[in-house]
Amino acid sequence: MTASTNRNSNSSVLIDVENLSVEFPVSSGTLFSRNRAILHAVDNVSLSIHKGESLGLVGESGSGKTTLGRTILHLQKATSGTVLFEGQPINTMKNRDLRTLRRRMQIIFQDPYSSLDPRMSAGAIIGEGIAIHNLASSRAEYNRRVAELLEMVGLNPVMARRFPHEFSGGQRQRIGIARALAVEPDFIICDGPVSALDVSIQAQILSLLANLQSELGLTYLFVAHDLSVVRHISDRVAVMYLDESSKSQPAPISTVNPCTPTHTP
Ligand SMILES: Nc1ncnc2c1ncn2[C@@H]1O[C@H](COP(=O)(O)OP(=O)(O)OP(=O)(O)O)[C@@H](O)[C@H]1O
C-alpha cells in the first residue's frame, strides 16, 4: 500500500459500487439457427473510490472496464447492484439530481479522433457544456472561460477557432480534457486516454492529467489495459479478469471478476 493510499484510507468515499452486474443478451449462429445467450460483461463488481484519489482500473480487452465506467456514469443500466454517488443511489435519483450528477461526473474518451465532432470548432466543443449547464452569465464570460480552459490544458486560446482536423492527436486529447473540465466536475473517468497516442505524447498527457488532478482536487477512475500506464497516476489499482473458460461458449460469454483492488507497490 502506497503512502497516497494511506492518505486516502481516511478520506470520504465519492463513488461506491456494490455488487454490480451488467448483462447483455447476445445471439449467434445463422438466420435459421440462432443461439441465444447472456453475456456477463460485468459480474458482481464492488469497489469504492475516495474523494481526491485516482483509482486505476486495468484488465484485458473485453473484461468489462468500459461497461463498468458507463454504468457508473449512468449511461448503461445495471442488471443488478448499486452505484452510490456521495451515498445516494444513482438509479433512483430524480431527473433534476441526475442533471447535476451529469455535470459532476465526466468522461475522457480513448480515441481523440472519433470523440470530437468534426463540424464544431474547438471553442464550441469546449463551451458546449458551459452553455448547457448555464455556467456563464454572458458571452464575454463564456469566451473567457473557454480561453482559460484552453490554457489549462496547454493550448493557445487563439486555437478556439480551429476545427478538430487541424490538431494533432495529443492536442485533440487536450481538447477532450478541456471539454470534461468545462463543467467543473468532481469525478472524471479517463477511459484509456493515452492508448491511441504515440508513446512520446503519452507521458505529456499523463503528466497533464496528474497536474490537473492535484490543482483541481479531482477524483479519477483511470482505465487502461496496461499496468505500466496506470501505476504512475494511480493511488490504488483494481484488476478486472476475463474468465478464460467462457471463451468456448457458443456466444462470447465472459465473466468478470469482482474488483478487489490490489495495490501497486
Ligand atoms: N452494448 C453491448 N451489447 C452487447 N455486448 C456488449 C455491449 N457493450 C459491451 N459489450 C460486450 O461486453 C464485454 C465487455 O466490453 P467492454 O467494452 O466493457 O470491455 P473492456 O474491458 O472495456 O474492453 P477494451 O479494453 O477492449 O475497451 C465485451 O465482450 C463486449 O463485446
Image: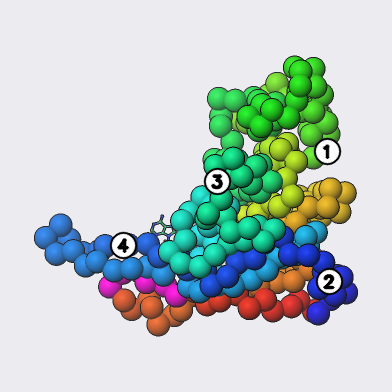
Amino acid type at circle 1 is Met
**CB atoms of marks 2 and 1 within 8 Å:** no
The secondary structure type at the circle numbered 3 is loop
> Percent from the top left, x then y, of residue 39?
37, 68
Nearest-to-viewer mark from 2 and 1:
2
Classify residue 208 as left or right of residue 133: right
Tell me which segment is drawn in magenta. 250-255
Q: Earlier in the sequence, mark 3 or mark 4?
A: 4
Q: Which residue is mark 4?
A: 26
Work out how far the residue at label 1 is from the one at label 4, CA to CA, in angstroms.
Answer: 43 Å
Q: Is residue 255 above or below residue 86?
A: below
Work out how far the residue at label 1 is from the one at label 3, CA to CA, in angstroms.
Answer: 33 Å
User: Can the viewer see residue 113 in this picture?
Assistant: no
The secondary structure type at the circle numbered 2 is loop
Amino acid type at circle 3 is Lys
**CB atoms of marks 3 and 4 within 8 Å:** no
Classify residue 146 as left or right of residue 246: right
**Viewer-closest of 7 and 54:** 7
Residue at point 71%, 52% (across, down): 187
The secondary structure type at the circle numbered 4 is strand
Q: Earlier in the sequence, mark 2 or mark 3?
A: 2
Residue at point 83%, 38% (across, down): 152
Work out how far the residue at label 2 is from the one at label 4, CA to CA, in angstroms.
Answer: 42 Å
Work out how far the residue at label 3 is from the one at label 4, CA to CA, in angstroms.
Answer: 31 Å
Residue 152 circle label = 1
Q: Earlier in the sequence, mark 2 or mark 4?
A: 2
Q: Main secondary structure of the magenta part?
A: loop
Q: Which residue is mark 3?
A: 94
Query: Furthest-left residue in view?
Result: 32
Q: Which residue is mark 2?
A: 10
9 within the magenta span: no
Q: Is mark 4 within 8 Å of ligand 1?
A: yes
